[in-house]
Amino acid sequence: MGINILWDPQAPAGIELPVARMIAMVLGRETGLVEYPFLIDGYDRNRNQHDAQKILDRLQDTLTRRYDIHGPLLLVTSRDLYVNGCDFVFGLARPASGVAIVSTARLGNGYYGRIPDDTDLIDRTAKEGAHELGHLLGLGHCENPECVMFRPRTLDELDRKKKMLCPACREAPGPGEEG
């Protein structure tokens, strides 16, 4: 089963292929970039952020049903995301529907007043994308802070993660596999 990646036209351009290749390397699955018209909604004017749950609702309804996409689908966007109860999220997955989203809004150095660096942005986007796709493939959060399935709460925790699954996560059964 291949992994589909939909790149929001407003997301940083020019890093799509390196991110897709790194995700494929981490998860050991083929990735492909898909292009479909998609309206990103869920904007909350009071927060100046987008509700990740509402975007996943539309992603599920519009793309998986209308365009009959098979396999996990990851949307990469530049919009700042939140879910109720959190100030922000780097990404969110909905395993039952096979859709996930990652935001680059807080993954770039510029957000933190650091010198912009595409290498950092590619690395972080790939790790967070692999993390959310890992959930779609049946993996849960991991306690190992170097595993891609570790749940980072800060940019430093995300940077500390490696672009790999720890041995326990690598051996964990995916959907439809026996444990």
Image: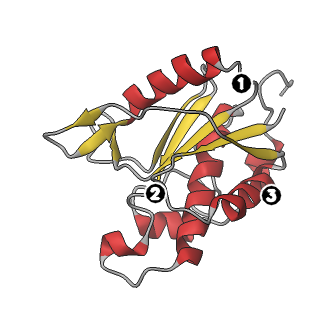
Quadrant of the image containing the C terminus: top right
The residue located at (78%, 53%) in the rendering is: 24
x, y percent for residue 34: 69, 40
Quadrant of the image containing the N terminus: top right
Residue at mark 3 to residue at mark 2: CA–CA distance: 20 Å
Q: Is residue 123 above or below residue 67?
A: below
Q: Secondary structure at mark 1?
A: loop
Residue assigned mark 2: 104
The residue located at (55%, 62%) in the rendering is: 13
Q: Is residue 146 above or below residue 78?
A: below
Residue assigned mark 3: 25
26 on left or right of 47 = right
Q: Amino acid at mark 1?
A: Ile
Q: Earlier in the sequence, mark 3 or mark 2?
A: 3
Circle 2 or circle 1, nearest the eye? 1
- In the picture, residue 40 is in which quadrant? top left
x, y percent for residue 33: 71, 46
Q: Secondary structure at mark 2?
A: loop
Residue 51 seen from this side = yes
Name, please, the residue furthest toward the front.
Answer: 37
73 on left or right of 32 = left
Q: Amino acid at mark 3?
A: Met
Circle 3 or circle 2, nearest the eye? 2
Residue at mark 2 to residue at mark 1: CA–CA distance: 24 Å
Residue at mark 1 to residue at mark 3: CA–CA distance: 22 Å
The residue located at (71%, 18%) in the rendering is: 68
**Do labels 2 and 1 touch, CB within 8 Å?**
no
Name, please, the residue furthest toward the bottom.
Answer: 115
Q: Amino acid at mark 2?
A: Thr
Residue assigned mark 1: 69
